[in-house]
Amino acid sequence: MSALANPQRTLKCPPDIRSALAVLTCAVVAACHVATAQAAAPFAKTQATGFYRMMVGDIEVTALNDGIVPLPVDKLLSNVSPADISSSLARIYLGVPVDTSFNGFLVNTGSKLVLIDTGAGTLMDPGTGRLVTNLPAAGYQPEEVDEIYITHMHLDHVGGLTLNSQRVFSNATVRAAKTEGDYWLSPAKMAAAPNDARTAFQNAMNSLDPYVKAGKFYPFEGDITLVSGVRALGTHGHTPGHTSCRRESGQKAGHPRRLDPGQLLDPHPPSCPQGARVDPLSGAISETKDHRTRTE
Ligand SMILES: [Zn+2]
């Protein structure tokens, strides 16, 4: 009986022959793949999952990307000439606009799951709002988040709190500086603001209101320990109650925005993102353009 007539016998061939057959099989399969690679393939139109994880002391920090926005830094920064912006960008091979990453931070203290900022949700550029989908990709569900710390109430930090007027993080309490809430959640302050600034108030109110109504919003005052290992640090100026979160061992895990060419290489000339008309020291609201903001 030949081997072809009895397939069982082919299983008994020596290992070197089986290896040779395997190589031949792989070669045939590879050839087929080469052939199919010539055909038109659909565009994937998706990016790799956006998170990066590291230990900071004994807590785990996961940076969750919310998206990337082409930032018109020449319009965003005041009191800096377009020529200075262009030359600074050119030194690091960039131009206007600058693709800018927006991120939140998930902190696992070992006993609490804390989210620092929530991304833009549906309030901003279509390229943002991905933090909530990157969270499960990083291994956690929104309902597992115990506490949310809001560094400040601009839309790219609070927009992810709410979807269709419902709390995205159903079991979380939200915390932010009292001065921040007193400003952005105040109908009186919104009424007194310039017309072009009122949308920012409305965005903050829409994002926070479901948590306020559910008794889930707990503002804090001063630099306090929010949870073991994470301490609030007042960095007022960008907004009245802007707060950074500091790892109590001294390492920062805070505000993600970077505007290196325009702000960080030369942070001394007064330059301020639009809509932030506040005194850097007192947090008082000011209409003057001669102001500066702390770099973030
Ligand atoms: Zn901001």
Image (tube, grey):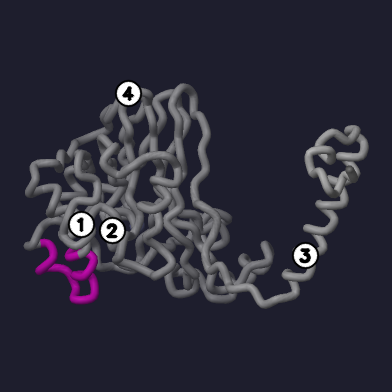
Q: Which mark is residue 111?
A: 4
* Lower sequence index among marks 2 and 1: 2
Q: Position of residue 163 (x, y in %)?
A: 23, 59
Q: CA distance from mark 4 to mark 1?
A: 27 Å
CB within 8 Å, label 4 to label 1? no
Element carrying mark 2: helix
**Does 200 appear in magenta?**
yes
Judged by depth in the image, the label closer to the viewer, 4 or 2, is 4
Q: Nearer the viewer, mark 4 or mark 1?
A: 4
**Quadrant of picture, ligand 1:** bottom left
- The answer to which of marks 4 and 3 sits earlier in the sequence is 3
Q: Amino acid at mark 2?
A: Gly
Q: Nearer the viewer, mark 4 or mark 3?
A: 3
Residue plotted at (33% across, 59% down): 120
The three-letter code of the residue at mark 4 reads Ser
Horizontal placement of 62 versus 209: left or right?
right
Q: Which mark is residue 32?
A: 3
For badge 3, the amino acid type reads Cys
Q: Is residue 295 visible?
A: no
Discs 3, 2 touching: Cβ within 8 Å? no
Q: Position of residue 106 (x, y in %)?
A: 39, 39
Quadrant hosting residue 214? top left
Seen at 29% across and 27% down, the residue is 227
Which residue appears at 33% of the width and 41% of the height?
Answer: 115
Farthest front residue? 1
Q: Which residue is mark 2?
A: 159
Crowd tier of the residue under label 2, counting other residues whose Cα lies within 10 Å: few below 14, some 14–19, many 20 or above: many
Residue 207's disc number: 1
Dominant secondary-structure state across the stretch colored magenta: helix
Judging from the image, what secondary structure is the residue with disc 3 in?
helix
| The magenta segment | 189-202
* Three-letter residue code for mark 1: Ser
